[in-house]
Image (tube, rainbow, N blue to C red):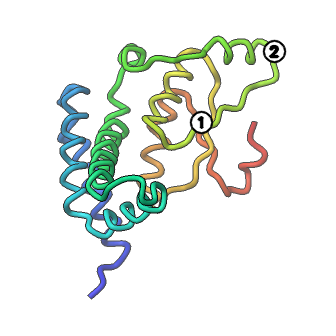
Amino acid sequence: MKISKKLVRSFIFAALTSVAFLTRPLSWKWGVRLGGMIGTLLYYLLRRERAKSLEGLRIAFGSDKPERELHQILKKSFQNLGKGLIEIINFANLKPEQIESLITIEGEEYLKEAECKGNGTILITGHLGNWELMAAALSLRGYPLHVIAAPLYDPRIDEWIVQHRSRFQVETISRGSPSSSKKS
């Protein structure tokens, strides 16, 4: 018997908001530690996701890495995803000075130089580290920031993240929306 997507999505949203509520009183450091533990738990619970991810690692590394090492890489990846999850859901609780204390920007002089030329700047990043924190940090340093993002599968989660970004004056341009090519 298949569980409906709507029910699964509602469960995920409820779980996220519950974890956000429960981790709010924790320090950033303890929240991130808890996120690592959640990631470890999910590594063991989400067999299908683990198998898909393991197959991707096998393709990426071929026979260069033993199976045990691939599992270690995968477990660490799940732990990092858990840490990132806690960081993102507790992102709105941070004060600007806390963000400054959590990040280091290398090469900002190049960004400043590009901005001084007055033509604007395009920064491209992947899903590496905490890109939400990076965007907030740049915005707090005075760089006007717009991010292009694909809408998430659940509009409630999507809106939640957009609100977090807007708290730090980061505007979200929804990829695929009719006005996305017209925003500047």
Q: Quadrant of residue 83?
A: top left
Tag 2, which secondary structure?
Answer: loop
Quick one: SS at disc 1? strand
What is the number of the mark on residue 171?
1
Q: Position of residue 164 (x, y in %)?
A: 44, 36
Q: What quarter of the picture does the C terminus occupy?
A: top right
Q: Check residue 117 in the rendering and tell me which mark sits there, or answer none.
A: 2
Type of amino acid at the residue the image marks with label 2: Lys
Name the residue: 47% across, 62% down.
59
The foreground one among 73 and 35 is 73
Q: Amino acid at mark 1?
A: Glu
Above or below, 111 against 155 in this view is: above
Q: Image quadrant of residue 144?
A: top right
At horizontal 58% and vertical 48% (from top left) the residue drawn is 149
* Circles 2 and 1 in contact, beta carbons < 8 Å: no
Query: Which label lies toward us, 2 or 1?
Result: 2
- Crowding at dot 1, Cα within 10 Å, few <14 / some 14-19 / many 20+, comes out as some
Can you give x and y, in whole percent of width and height, for residue 126 in the image? 55, 42
In this picture, residue 151 sits left or right of residue 49: right
Q: Earlier in the sequence, mark 2 or mark 1?
A: 2
Please, is residue 38 above or below residue 111 in the view?
A: below
Of the pair 112 and 144, the residue shown nearer to us = 112
**What is the C-alpha distance between the residues marked 2 and 1?**
22 Å
| Residue 157 image point, x, y percent | 41, 52
Badge 2 density bin: few <14, some 14–19, many ≥20, Cα 10 Å: few
Q: Is residue 154 above or below residue 183?
A: below
Numbered disc total: 2
